[in-house]
Image (tube, rainbow, N blue to C red):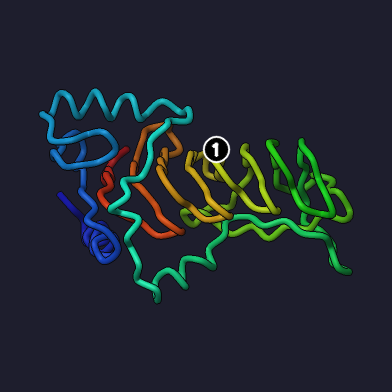
Amino acid sequence: MLTFKNIILLLINLYLVNCQTLLSSQTKNENGCDVGKINQEQFENWWSEMSIQKPIKCQIPAVWKSYDDEDLLRIFSKRILVSSYKCNQEVPIDHTFRGEIVDGQLRGSGKLKLGKGKIPDPESCLKVTKLLNQVVTEITGTFKGGVLHGVAKIALENGGIVIANFANGLFDGLRREWSPNGNLAFVGFYHKGAKAGFCFSRFGKI
């Protein structure tokens, strides 16, 4: 049964996207990434495949890219997860980056670790926002112009994991979220930082 809190969260999701809910093991057949209209057994097999924590090639349908609510896009365009730049009389937050740093910006493929005790490059400053109300502790991915561009794996302080595609620092493409106990909790698409098209969420004990 949906709790009052989950109903509110679902309504928030529905404001932005037609997001289907999976109640415990109950599933609903809806369109998603290569899902189509399938039976429950096929859906559960698809869900199991999506549960594997590795990058998946899955392009957002062109029709979903027509999402053009300019007011919302302006809001979401400010939600860049991490940006790096040359420090200007600032003290950089504790972090290490195993990769290339050019003029203070993270470049190319690498692993970013955040947290106390990490000794940063003195000229590389970061701005990192919370994700799912959790502090980001590690990011493995590709950086372009100081922000994420391409697929990235993000570790959260509570043990949760997010694997998602980025474009110019914003969520853009397939995004999957795992709960701290390793269970897949969300599969959906983003475009320019906002949810787009169908997504699948699992509420309750996961």
Residue 82 image point, x, y percent = 63, 55
Residue flagged by tag 1: what amino acid is it? Lys
Viewer-proximal residue among 155 and 85: 85
Q: Relative to 169, is 133 on the left or the right?
A: left
Q: Which residue is at 82% across, 49% downward?
A: 102
* Number of other residues with Cα within 10 Å of mark 1, as a class: few under 14, some 14 to 19, many 20 or more: some
Residue 107 picture quarter: top right
Looking at the rendered structure, the secondary structure element under dot 1 is: strand
Residue 47 image point, x, y percent = 28, 30
Q: Quadrant of the C terminus?
A: top left
Residue 196 picture quarter: bottom left
Residue 118 picture quarter: top right
Q: Which residue is at 62% across, 37% downward?
A: 140
Counting labels gives: 1
Q: Which residue is at 37% across, 33% downward?
A: 183
64 relative to 98, above or below: below
Residue 153 image point, x, y percent = 55, 38
86 relative to 153, above or below: below
Q: Which residue is at 29% across, 38% downward?
A: 33
Q: Which residue lies furthest to the bottom in this view?
A: 71
Residue 119 image point, x, y percent = 84, 46
Q: Relative to 82, is 160 on the left or the right?
A: left
Q: Relative to 98, is 30 on the left or the right?
A: left
Viewer-proximal residue among 15 and 151: 151
From the image, tell me which residue sits under label 1: 153
